[in-house]
Amino acid sequence: MLLRVVLIACVLAALVAGCGGGDDSDDAGLAPSSFEEVVVAELKKAGIEAEPSFDLNVSAFRGPNRVDVDLEDDYAHYEEDPDRESEIVAGVVEEAERRLDEGVADLSLEDVRDDLMPLLKSPFELRTYDFEPAETAFPGGLAAVYAVDREGDFTLVEPEDVERWGTTVEELHELALLNLLRQTNEEEPLLCEPSGNQKLCGWSSSDGYDATRMIVPELRRQIVREYGGPAVYAVPMENVFVALPEELVSRGKTEELFRRKVDRDFQTSKDPLSPEVFVERDGELALFR
């Protein structure tokens, strides 16, 4: 009778913690989110910034460049053989490092033509890079750089890429502007909204290219047509491009108020770009004085 009671107790205990102290119980293994965390930690140990992006996917960064790492197959291999965890994770880190190192080195201009995009950057942002990207200067110390922005990776173009492609920065600039214009007209039309007695026009879609739209002449012309006359522009942060009629800003205290708002947004933004106000003169951007 005592033996039967002991056996029943052992069975019940096994349902919770395993009979005999649990020494032979199976490890449940890492959940997908925990596997992502392990990968992120190992990437950081290798000197690569990383963060989970969505289910079983991690983004790895080196400066402004990014690669997205799909972990679905790696996690499936881990589930099949949990003892290979270190080996599998090391392979993920090695692959991310390889992709970041290669960048666009094995791609031709034709390969990247449809994915080439401009980005307006501040001088203090450019100083954080450990390399000098191909760039075009703009007023206020701003510069346009060029990214190959594809699904799965984001890489800034360097001067050696331009030379290898047998082209010029000027030609890349025109191609990148055309791509941004096409994307904007298809996906992010000009937005004009009332603000007090004024109408503010511009873009604030948070797609990464809002402020950069200021350097696209055709997009500035869309604003001029909307206002029926010249406009002034501001890009206080990377995700905002806003405009007001030049005639309105030149009146009374409007310029002071506009500049104050631009400067406040610049000072408080996580991604500041410029505290300046811009205007178009003879088809080119200039500082508004």
Image (cartoon, rainbow, N blue to C red):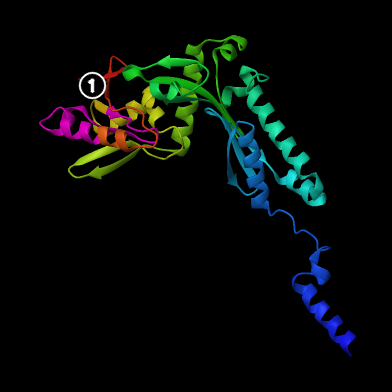
Q: Residue at x 15, y 33 (%)?
A: 254
Q: Position of residue 107 (x, y in %)?
A: 66, 20
Q: Which of the two residues, 220 or 146, is positioned nearer the viewer here?
A: 146
Image side of residue 49 versus residue 21, left or right: left
Q: Residue at x 39, y 23 (%)?
A: 124
Count of picture labels? 1
Picture quadrant of residue 188: top left
Query: Residue under circle 1?
Result: 288
| 21 shown above or below 241 | below
Image side of residue 238 versus residue 70, left or right: left
Q: What element carries label 1?
A: loop
Residue 82 in magenta stretch: no
Image side of residue 179 versus residue 235, left or right: right
Q: Which of the two residues, 89 or 169, is positioned nearer the viewer here?
A: 89
Q: Residue at x 71, y 53 (%)?
A: 30
Residue 216 at least partly seen: no
Image side of residue 59 versus residue 286, left or right: right
Question: Furthest-left residue in view?
Answer: 252
Picture quadrant of residue 213: top left
Quarter of the N terminus within the rendering: bottom right
Q: Position of residue 187 (x, y in %)?
A: 47, 38
Q: Give the range drawn in magenta.
A: 233-262
Question: Furthest-bottom residue in view?
Answer: 1
Q: Where is residue 123 in the image (x, y as percent from the top left)?
A: 39, 21
Q: Which residue is drawn at 82% across and 49% down?
A: 81
Picture quadrant of residue 258: top left
Q: Which of the two residues, 42 or 237, is positioned nearer the viewer here?
A: 42
Quarter of the C terminus within the rendering: top left
Residue type pointed to by label 1: Phe
Residue 236 in magenta stretch: yes
